[in-house]
Amino acid sequence: MEKSTSPREGFSSGLAVFLAALGSAVGLGNIWKFPYLTGANGGGAFLFVYFICVLFVGIPVLLCEWYVGRYTRRNAVGAFESLKPGSAWKGIGVMGVLASYLIMFFYTCVAGWVYFYCFKAFTGSFASVTANTVEELFGQVIGVGTAGKSFFSKDVLSPIFWQVIVLCVVGTGISMGVRSGIERITKTLMPLLFMLIIICDIRALTLPGAGEGIRFLFHIDFSQITPAVVLSALGLAFFKLSLAMGVMITYGSYFTEDVHLFKTAGKIAFSDTLVSMLAGIAIFPTVFSFGMEPSAGPGLLFMTIPLVFSKMPLGAFLLAAFFLLTSFAATTALLSLMEVPVAFWTEEFNISRKKATFLNCLFIGLVGVTAALSVDSSSLLGGYKLWGRGFFDFFDHLSSNIIMPLGGLLIAIFVGYFAKKDDVACELSNHGSLQNDTYVSFFNFVIRYVSPALLVIIFLNTIGVISF
Ligand code: PHE
């Protein structure tokens, strides 16, 4: 296929490209997954393994997606259709669109909790919280004890309310377009996010006993690196870099021609990891300073943090800053996810952007409600199971553990073995204007042999054929 030159809206500059892609990478993963996994799995040693995974799988797959997107200038499905018309390869794109929906079903729900906590923090409601009240509050948010109640009762509707607000915010941003929506929002929010996180870090590091938290995060212990830990680092690298969801293909299709893809990928991986570390530095010294135990996931973000932050001087202000930055992170990640189906429906079916956004938000809201109401076994839909899992867990498991490694593997195989080598080299060197043959050869080697081998191992492990 000839490289597409059709006029299509895209990002305006290299900086816009960097901030939008970083906005996608930085998300809830940085705040509730990464710091804890690092601390609990060997600190500096885990970071080292994570970097290896990013270098040999994350960045190569990211480059494959950007190649597919920028070369074709189409959405995730259309891109494969223009590279290999009429072939089954567009299944990779279809899988990406499906996976982006699955992630949005539960990600909008968690983002809703973050918005709610942000609102609470700004209105000063955490000033006098205790261990019991935070637990009760989080219980309300996830609809504990709503089984058997009417759908229209207040206890059932309140977990959904903030999810709807999230969809309205993300939908508004997306309907404004790539440049006046996504670009403008990420350009504003990403620098603010960095500022807020640094403010939280300074406060955390000046607390008495902060050293223990830093030790938790950065101690180097290679003995904790087991094959299972390596796998979790690899899965995390995929989730962090928003891979195999159609996101980076779609964003790649809006990149300017002069963007140096290798350098941008390196900068994104580095900055995203930096945000995770900064988040860890804001969280763990604070948690340890108050003699609490660190935990992972929802418990850390929605119970431990409000509790410890509210106890320290300037706590109310810092808590508001912390939840504000978390809501920025979740929003910019969701913008990238929502752009996947919106680009697909507008380009493949000629639906206007506004209409596609509205219909997608409606659909995600309707299905996403099942995630919001199934987090706890005692919530309204907590008793329903899909293949043995509640809705929330099912959406998470299917997208992160099955579609992500499988999609990543297929993209690597497609670019490594089936795409035209010259086209790939031409795109990665910006039509020969960059003298980066060594990078390109290294990329070709990794994408053909190293990444697929590692991805096959993850995939077989996930589906239980081999286990560590
Ligand atoms: N990278 C985002 C995070 O860390 C999550 C995400 C995954 C966003 C896949 C888009 C696509 O939270």
Image (cartoon, rainbow, N blue to C red):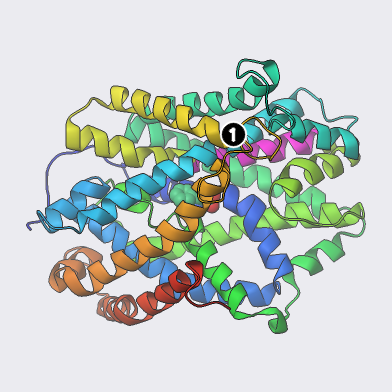
Instruction: Please name the residue shown 23% across and 67% down the image.
Output: 414
Left or right side of 414 for 5: left
Q: Quadrant of the C terminus?
A: bottom right
Tally the numbered discs: 1
Q: Position of residue 326 (x, y in %)?
A: 63, 41
Q: Position of residue 380 (x, y in %)?
A: 64, 29
Residue at image mark 1: 372
Q: Position of residue 213 (x, y in %)?
A: 82, 62
The relative height of residue 224 versus residue 71 in the rendered view (above or below) is below
Left or right side of 445 for 49: right
Q: Amino acid at mark 1?
A: Ala
Q: Is residue 434 visible?
A: no
Range of magenta residues: 316-333
User: Secondary structure of the magenta portion, mostly?
Assistant: helix
Q: Image quarter for residue 443?
A: bottom left
Left or right side of 283 for 190: left
User: In terms of depth relative to the viewer, which is nearer, 118 or 178?
Assistant: 118
Label 1 beta carbon within 8 A of ligand 1: no
Residue at the far bottom in the pictured view: 223
Instruction: Please name the residue shown 29% across and 78% down the image.
Output: 448
Instruction: Please name the residue shown 60% across and 33% down the image.
Output: 381
